[in-house]
Image: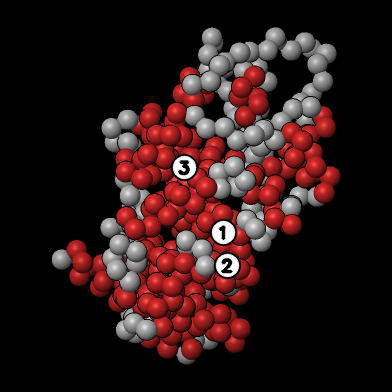
Amino acid sequence: MPPRTSGSGSGSGAATAKLRRAHRKSRNGCWECKRRHIKCDENRPACSNCVISERTCSFPAQPTPAAAPTPPEQPVSSFNEPLSASQNRSLLQTFPTPYFTNKHLILLHHFRKSLLFDVDNVDIIIDLALDWSSEAPYALDQLLAISADHLAMTQVESSAESAASWRRIATELQTRALTHFNRDGQDTANHESRFVPRFLFSSLLSLHMLYDTLTQYRATFHVFIERFCNSVCLHRGVKSTSSPGYQTLIRSPLAPFFLGVRDAAELGDKGDECAPLITLIENSDLSPSAVEACSTAAHTLQWAFNVHRNLPKSVNVQAASAFPVVLSDNYIEPVRKHRPEALLVLAYYGVLLHRCRHVWLFGDSGAFLIHLIADHLGSYWKDALRWPLEELERDQG
C-alpha cells in the first residue's frame, strides 16, 4: 500500500505529493477528506468517511469559477525510495504528530486477544511496539494495521460494511507507518539506535504485504504474478534492514525469532522435497544465469521446508514468510517472463504455504497458488507438477 501524508499550504506540496496515493479528486469534498487525501462522497451534513471514522465533517464554500485549477496528483514514491533533503525538511515541518483513538485501542486489544502470532511472541511484539511508540511510531502503526485487516477478515460474512471500514483503517495505518518510516530513514544518525523498531516494522510490513498479495490479487494469473514480483522488492527491504545489525538483534528481545530459525535450519532434520525440482532446473534449457537463479531459489525453498519441519507448529509460519524475503532479482526476472521452471518454484512454495494453512495469514493461499500455476502451465508440465497437486489431494483425502 503506497504511502500518503497530510499537509497543507504550497510549501509542503512537493513533499506531500510524492507520498500520496493517487486518487480521483473530489473538488467539493469535506475538509477532513481533503486533509486525508481520500475521495469524499460529498454526503451532507456528514460524509460517509467521517461518519465511519468518527471525525468532525465540514464542507468548504462552493468554489468560484475563477478559482485556480487543482494541480494534478503526482506518482507516489516506493517503500525504499528516499526523499530529497528539501522534501524531508518540508515533511518534518508539516507532518502531524501521531494520534491514537479508541479504535486503535480496540485493535491493540484484538491483536493480543486473538493471538495473531504465537502466545510466546505476541507479548514481545506488543511490548516492543509500545516501548518505541514515541520515537518510532511506525512499528505500532504497522502492528495495528495487521490487526485491522484480521478484524476485517473475521467480519466479512457478518457485516460487509464493518469489514470494509476496518480494511480502510488498515490502509490508513500502514500509510501512516510508511510515511513515518520514510521520514525516520532520512535521519541516519538514529539508524543504529532505532534498529530494533525499524526491523520489527519491516518484518510486520513484510508479513502484511505477503498476506495482501496472496489474498487480494487473485483475479488473474498476470495480476498475481505482477503483484508478487513487486512485493518481493519490498520484502528485500527486510533483508537489507536486518543484515547490518544482526549482533544487535540477537541481543534484543527479538533474539528468539532468529535463534529458533537458525537452529531449525542447521541442527534439525533435512528433507528432500525440492530435489526433483532442482534436478529439473539444472537439466533445463534456461540460460546459465537463469539456471543459477532458479536453482538458488529452489535450494532456498528447501531450506524453508527444513525450518518448517523442525520448528514447533506455533511458530513454523516463519519459514513461509521468510522465503520471499531472500529471493533475488535474478530469480524474479524469469518469474516476470513466466519461465516455467521459475513458476514451478512458486508451485512448490504453494505446498509450504498449504502446510501453514492453519495460520490466518495464509489460509487457502497454498492451494490457490498451486492451481494457478498448474492451470497456466498446462498439461505439458503435469509431471513436474505431480507432487504439489498430490500434496493437496492427500491432505483433502
Q: CA distance from mark 1 to mark 2?
A: 8 Å
Residue 305 tag number:
none
Q: CA distance from mark 2 to mark 3?
A: 25 Å
Is 85 on the left-hand or right-hand side of 145? right
Q: Where does the image place residue 237, in percent across and percent down from the top left?
A: 60, 62
- Which residue is more in the foreground, 144 or 224? 144
Residue 258 left/right relative to 387 = right
Graded by Cα atoms within 10 Å as few (under 14), some (14 to 19) or many (20 or more), the crowding at tag 1 reads: many
Secondary structure of residue under mark 2: helix
The disc placed on residue 144 is 3
Q: Secondary structure at mark 3?
A: helix
- Residue 327, relative to residue 217: is it above or below? below
Residue 87: x and y in percent read 80, 43
Is there any visible trace of residue 298 in the rendered image?
no
Which residue is rendered at x = 29% and y = 36% of the image?
Answer: 157
Q: CA distance from mark 1 to mark 3?
A: 18 Å
Near mark 2 (Cα within 10 A), the count class, few <14, some 14-19 or many ≥20, is some
Q: Nearer the viewer, residue 309 or 384?
A: 309
Q: Residue at x 62, y 46 (%)?
A: 135
Q: Is residue 90 visible?
A: yes
Please, which colouring scheme is shown? secondary structure
Q: Indicate whether 395 appears above or below 299.
A: above
Mark 1 vs mark 3, foreground winner is: 1
Which amino acid, mark 3? Leu
Residue to which mark 2 is pinned: 248
Q: Identify the residue position indicated by label 1 in the image.
A: 196
* Residue at left offset 48%, top offset 40%: 170
The amino acid at mark 1 is: Val
Q: Amino acid at mark 2?
A: Thr
